[in-house]
Image (cartoon, grey):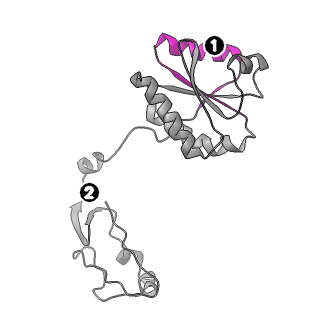
C-alpha cells in the first residue's frame, strides 16, 4: 500500500528518505520544488514494494512473481445487465431462475430515463457482487409489448423487481439518488437470500 503524503500549498513538507534505491532530497521542499523533481525522485520504482503506516514509510523489497499474485482479485468489478427484448426472453429468464431455485433481478427502464442513466453503473457493480448466484436483467419498456409491462405490474420507472417462483416478490422504485436505490436493492436481495 502506498500512502500519498499530503502537500499543502504555501507550506513546507519534509519528505522522508526511504533507502539508497529510492533517494529523495533530505531537504524540505515547497510544492513547486517537489513538482520540479524528476518522476524517478518523486515516486519509488514500480519494482519496489512500499509500506506506509502512519508517518513511517519503508521499502519492503523487490516484487516477486509469487508476491504480486497474492494481491490479484479475479472477480469482475461490474457485469453488464443482460438485455431482454421480448416476452419470450422474459419467460425464459424467469423459468431458468426457477429451475435453479434462485431469484432474478429485473430492471425496468427506458434508455432516455436520466435516473436509469445514473443508476446503471451502480447496478452493474451490484450484479458483480452477486455473480454468479443471481442474474440481473434489464428491459427497455419501449422495446417490449405493453402486455408484458402490465403483467409485471409496472407503475413507475426505473423499477428494480425481484422475481422468484415466476412471481414478483419485491420491488424498488428508483426515483431518488442512485446510491440510496442501490442500498435498497441490496437490502431487498439480502432479505430474499436470507429468508427474512
Residue pictured at 59% horizontal, 45% vertical? 178
Horizontal relation, residue 152 to residue 36: left or right = right
Q: Is residue 109 magenta?
A: yes
User: Which quadrant would the N terminus be assigned to in this image?
Assistant: bottom left
Mark 1 Cα-neighbour bin, 10 Å: few <14, some 14–19, many ≥20 = some
Tag 2 and tag 1, C-beta contact below 8 Å: no
User: Which quadrant would the C terminus be assigned to in this image?
Assistant: top left
Q: Is residue 131 visible?
A: no
- The residue labelled by disc 1 is 91
Horizontal relation, residue 2 to residue 183: left or right = left
Earlier-in-chain disc, 2 versus 1: 2
Horizontal relation, residue 111 to residue 6: left or right = right
Q: Nearer the viewer, residue 153 or 27?
A: 153
- Give percent across and percent down for residue 164: 53, 16
Q: Secondary structure at mark 1?
A: helix
Q: Which residues are magenta?
A: 81-110
- The residue labelled by disc 2 is 63
Within the image, what quadrant is residue 3 found in? bottom left
Q: Nearer the viewer, residue 88 or 192?
A: 192
Q: Is residue 168 magenta?
A: no
Q: Is residue 148 above or below residue 49?
A: above
Amino acid at each position: 500500500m502506498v500512502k500519498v503524503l499530503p502537500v499543502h500549498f504555501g507550506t513546507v513538507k519534509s519528505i522522508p528518505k526511504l533507502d539508497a534505491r529510492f533517494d529523495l532530497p533530505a531537504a524540505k521542499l515547497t510544492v513547486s520544488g517537489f513538482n520540479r523533481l524528476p518522476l524517478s525522485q518523486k515516486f519509488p520504482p514500480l519494482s519496489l514494494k512500499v509500506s506506509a503506516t502512519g508517518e513511517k514509510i519503508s521499502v519492503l523489497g523487490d516484487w516477486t512473481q509469487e508476491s504480486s499474485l497474492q494481491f490479484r482479485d479475479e472477480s469482475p468489478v461490474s457485469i453488464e445487465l443482460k438485455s431482454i427484448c421480448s416476452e419470450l426472453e422474459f419467460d425464459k429468464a424467469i423459468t431458468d431462475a426457477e429451475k435453479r431455485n434462485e431469484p432474478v433481478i429485473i430492471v425496468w427502464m427506458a434508455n432516455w430515463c436520466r435516473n436509469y442513466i445514473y443508476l446503471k453503473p451502480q447496478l452493474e457493480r451490484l450484479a458483480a457482487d452477486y455473480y454468479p448466484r443471481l442474474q440481473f436483467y434489464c428491459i427497455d419498456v419501449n422495446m417490449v409489448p405493453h402486455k408484458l409491462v402490465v403483467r409485471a405490474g409496472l407503475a413507475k420507472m426505473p423499477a428494480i423487481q425481484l422475481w422468484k417462483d415466476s412471481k414478483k416478490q419485491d420491488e424498488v422504485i428508483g426515483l431518488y439518488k442512485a446510491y440510496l436505490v442501490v442500498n435498497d436493492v441490496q437490502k431487498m436481495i439480502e432479505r430474499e437470500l436470507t429468508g427474512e
